[in-house]
Image: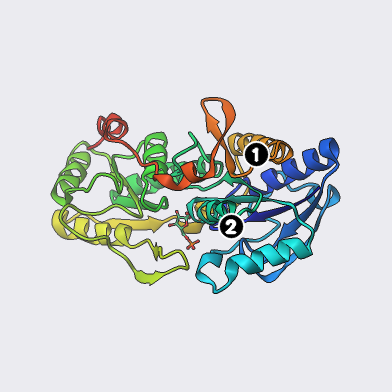
Amino acid sequence: MRVGVLTGGGDCPGLNAVIRAVVRKGVGMYGYDFIGFRDGWRGPLEGNGSALDVKSVRGILPRGGTILNSSRTNPLQVEGGVERIKDNLRNFRVEALIAIGGEDTLGVATKLHEQGLHVVGVPKTIDNDLGATDYTFGFDTAVNVAMEAIDRLHTTAESHRRALIVEVMGRHAGWIALHAGLAGGANIILIPEVPFDIEKVCSYIEHRFRTNYAPIVVVAEGAVPTGGDMILKDASRDAFGHVKLSGIGDWLAKEIEHRTGHEARCTVLGHIQRGGTPTAFDRVLATRFGLHAIEAVHDAAWGTMVALRGTNIVRVALCEATQELKTVDLARYSEAEVFFG
Ligand code: F6P
């Protein structure tokens, strides 16, 4: 059998580990051959793919990014997009497709499965916001990057007696902020799920200075002040209709300076969280996802996605992954509140 592989949406550390595991097991155990499609859904849409063999996946386990490149192309927005994908898969003699992606990529995979394509999904995203899996790979690396940044910011914040704000990614879920904030000992963590009161934030800041420490605030890019709107630098949208988040960190720094009189600075971690080598946790999770995804292809389990439940990798319906965003619940957030102020 010939199997196609693609990586779509925002990249994250661990994508190459999935590709390697899929190809190694697919060639070694099942005798399959592979076509790697370029740039997410743009690859099958434009017929841009090439052979992926064991040699081409050598040495990629520790490498961040994706050897197949990625894009946020939405073929459902392209006239005749689904038919073009079907034709191109036929031309490449590809019988099954493994789509590695987040909410958007897997949403397209779900639609294509409904149209009869043989698709298996693998969940990825640093945001960890996919409903059907306990964790996505990429998240642990992003959290570790943010934690290390917070560790470093503590010392410079103390030297200058400043409030330092760290804006992290995560879109509309606060997982990165919550985990990095807890791991890095932040004094305040602000997440999209719980609108924040700026006066309360300032009173935590002042309390922290009174006790002779410099405060570190971790704010998720999607966090919103109570009664206010999302603060954005750029309101343009991608092909899936998402706005570019970021701006809340700078807004907070200004508000804090203005309201408390203490100097404040903001560090936006941005794409640093998505780059570089995956952690051991992400390499193992991504590798296991890849091994189970090719097994799902072998079992003709079309329309399924591999997922982590506890420590086991299971198969779930693809549509489950995109049905509901997995956000931080109040109980989890309350655990962290003990350390605020
Ligand atoms: O979904 C992953 C993510 O990194 C989000 O956390 C972030 O909001 C978005 O992608 C950034 O997208 P882009 O790379 O297109 O700027």
Mark 1 is on which residue type?
Ala
| Amino acid type, mark 2 | Gly
Q: Is residue 187 left or right of residue 138?
A: left
Q: Is mark 1 within 8 Å of ligand 1?
A: no
SS at badge 2: loop
Q: Judge from the rendering whether residue 33 lies leftward or rightward of residue 207; answer left or right.
A: right
Report crowding for label 1: few under 14, some 14 to 19, many 20 or more residues within 10 A (C-alpha). some
Q: Earlier in the sequence, mark 2 or mark 1?
A: 2
Asked which secondary structure carries label 1, the reply is: loop
Residue that sits furthest to the bottom in the current view: 79
Foreground: disc 2 or disc 1: 1
Residue marked by disc 1: 301
Report x, y in % for residue 17: 68, 44
Residue 219 visible in image:
yes
Q: Which mark is residue 292?
A: none
Q: Is residue 127 left or right of residue 266?
A: right
Q: Nearer the viewer, residue 238 or 293?
A: 293
Give 276 or 172, whichever is nearer the viewer: 172
What residue is disc 2 on?
8
